[in-house]
Amino acid sequence: MYRRRRLAVVTASIIVVIGVVAGATALISSLNSRADAAPASEVASTPSPTPTPTPLSPVEQILAGANDPLACAVSFEGQGIADAPMLQWQNAVYTPLPIPTQEGQVFAGWYATPEAATALDAAARINGADLVACTEQQNVLHVAWMTPDENAAVDAQIPILMYHQFTSRPEGEDGWLRGNYAYIGDFDAQMNHIATTGFYLPTWDELSAFIDGRLYLPNHSVVITDDDADQSWFDLAVPVIEKYQVLSTSFMITAARQDPAPSPFVQRRSHTHNMHQAGANGQGQMVNLSAEEIAADLNTSGDILGVREVVAYPYGHYNDTAKQGVAMAGYEMARTIEPGYVSIGTDKFALPVVRINYGMGLEALINQIADAMVRRQIFFERLVRSARRCEAEFFFQPRIRQHRTVPEERHLLGAVHGHSQHPSCAQRRRQECGGDRQHRLAEPSRDLGYGDPTITCDVEDSRWAVGRRPHHGRRDIIDPHEHEEGV
Ligand SMILES: [Zn+2]
């Protein structure tokens, strides 16, 4: 890393080159033009005057076949839709709904009304996170479409939250796993926020289609997961999940426990059958076993759970062999513990996460799962604040000079450059202070999205250190969190 060779501290002006923050609002508004939804009654309305039995409509056939007052025939309507009605159950969450395709279009969801479909109203979008609500055992869902360009312009970044254990002690648990134990009061506030602020909760098949570019997800989406199915998950967290009716995923180590889903809002998925342990090299079994052995374990787990779809790598350990084993067992996706957000084109066998640790309250969660545009704003506010700190400490002169995007690294939106403005430089040639050299000091990482900017006030040439304040070392990293006050 070149940064490590750059040791001394820059003094001078900083130019904050900010990436494009503006674009997406206009694009979002253009999405409202899509979605067709011309309701058309499917139910035969005129009974035959003859005693000859009328053939049953598909909806009637479904209901007759189910012969259960809780059965619900769900029909699908709108442009390009040929899906047959399907059987669902009143007051259960929807079983997987069709993900239709149409040439040159991206599926933008099922909606309760044609108007909601036209408006892409996320609050009225229906999926496996919702309870089936039927009238007279029937229900019609309305399709929405958008173009691939419109979908790409949304540039949705989906957080997958990762929780572990829970505690009812506000002061947290002791011991080396302290960070893993979320305080249940924080969890309650966080789930309340997700439930009441219009978040869309995608199912895993939707997330997969989203990554393919086949399905639109709004930026205001979030996936809630818990690892290990600890007893505290059942005792403390699941009642909260139930209370707010937010869809979640419990990654279970099926060799350890195989409890049935404790709530309709808890999806059981695999955290492997028996690979949640260290192998020969001290790392997880996922990076010790052969692809065939991994696949055999995951097949056992998938059979127990009755679903494959996605696995969470124990300890987040994986490599290409692990990915191969996951694919061999018929899983479509795998979740790591690497920080980041899921976007179109994300590696399905290396889904990143937003880890929630003890001490992260509601505000921390809000910042982490805010829409990408908001996170960008937060990022740059911190960046500028840190740059000002550099100014105070190192005589930098931060400036926001221009907006910039870097297409090949969509998340690289800004960088800080510096050259010396230290008074003593006025008596020197500019080059001696690095005056004409712009040096990138900070950049948002692609994987971290717009998480936490870290500004490194450093240079490779000791001549640049002319303005360094004596209490700093030759290299200094400024953590924006430490300097949010009074800058
Ligand atoms: Zn685990």
Image: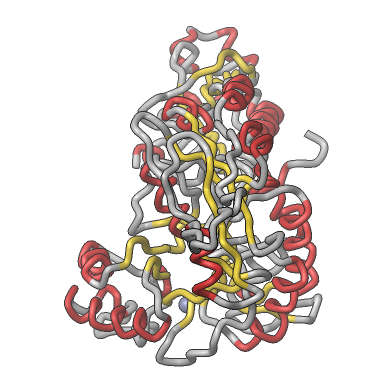
Q: Is residue 16 visible?
A: no
Total marks placed: 0
At which x and y percent is residue 63? Answer: 55, 68
Residue 149 coordinates in the image, percent (x, y): 44, 25
The residue at the point 64 percent across, 78 percent down is 263
Residue 228: x and y in percent read 51, 80
The colour scheme used here is secondary structure
Q: Which image quadrant: the N terminus?
A: top left
- Name the residue nearer the viewer: 65 or 405: 65
| Residue shown at 37% from the left, 79% from the top | 272
Looking at this view, name the residue that lies furthest to the front.
50
Q: Eyeballing the image, is 336 above or below 347?
A: below
Residue at the location (65% across, 69% down)? Answer: 90
On the rendered structure, is 400 left or right of 281? Answer: right
Q: Quarter holding the C terminus?
A: top right
Residue visible at 76% across and 49% down in the picture: 197
- 11 over 372 or under it: above or below: above
Residue 325, given in percent of the width and then of the height, sits at 23, 71
State the image quarter where residue 379 is shown. top right
Residue nearer the viewer, 94 or 51 = 51
Tell which of 215 and 384 is nearer to you: 215
Quarter occupied by residue 185: bottom right
Q: Nearer the viewer, residue 291 or 419?
A: 291
Tell me if residue 253 can be seen. yes
> Eyeballing the image, is 132 above or below 153?
below
Q: Quadrant of residue 21?
A: top right
